[in-house]
Image: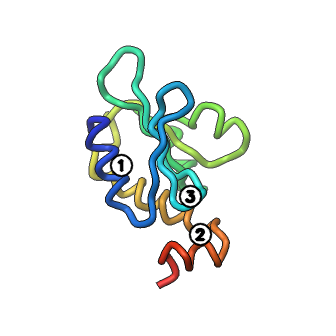
Amino acid sequence: MTLDDYNAFCASLPATSHVVQWGGAHVWKVGSKVFAIGGWSETSSVPFVTFKCSDIAFDILKEQPGCRPAPYLASRGMKWIQRVTAETMDDEALKDYLRDSHRLAGRNLTKRERRELGLDS
């Protein structure tokens, strides 16, 4: 998945916004909540993609080649994974995890914000 592919996919999800921050990371939010962070590795043109996941997915993915607990986030107890290669997670699986991350982040919005964004339908 290229950075353009990543950005296009995240943009296709409902009620999203995009900002480039944190040293060039492409940060995607649903409402006010971050659900995905994409950035370039220093040695490859393939972006690292970081996403929120369930407790079970975190426990499984953190042990898989090409995935790791997300720097900074996981060390603070948050269940975020960073895909660094497609070794065990292809692009279609990554899209599924990004959809789930979007859903999980959206659940943490206030009822009012979900309603205003059209996520409570």
Quarter of image, res 90: top left
Q: Quadrant of the N terminus?
A: top left
Vertical arrangement, residue 36 with respect to residue 40, above or below: below
Image-based side of 94 in relation to 72, left or right: left
Q: Amino acid at mark 1?
A: Leu
Location of residue 22 in the rendering, given as x and y in whole percent from the top left corner? 56, 30
Q: Amino acid at mark 3?
A: Ser
Mark 2 or mark 1, whichever is nearer to me? 2
> What residue does disc 2 label?
107
Quarter of image, res 5: top left
Image-based side of 114 in relation to 92, left or right: right
> What residue does disc 3 label?
54
Residue at (56% x, 58% y) in the render: 54
Q: CA distance from mark 1 to mark 3?
A: 14 Å
Vertical arrangement, residue 103 with respect to residue 87, above or below: below
Of residues 118 and 60, the one nearer the viewer is 118
Residue count near mark 3 (Cα–Cα under 10 Å), binned few <14, some 14–19, many ≥20: some
Q: Amino acid at mark 2?
A: Arg
> What residue does disc 1 label?
94
Q: Can residue 65 be spotted in the picture? A: no
Residue count near mark 1 (Cα–Cα under 10 Å), binned few <14, some 14–19, many ≥20: some
**Mark 2 or mark 1: whose residue is earlier in sequence:** 1
Of residues 61 and 70, the one nearer the viewer is 70
**Mark 1 or mark 3: whose residue is earlier in sequence:** 3
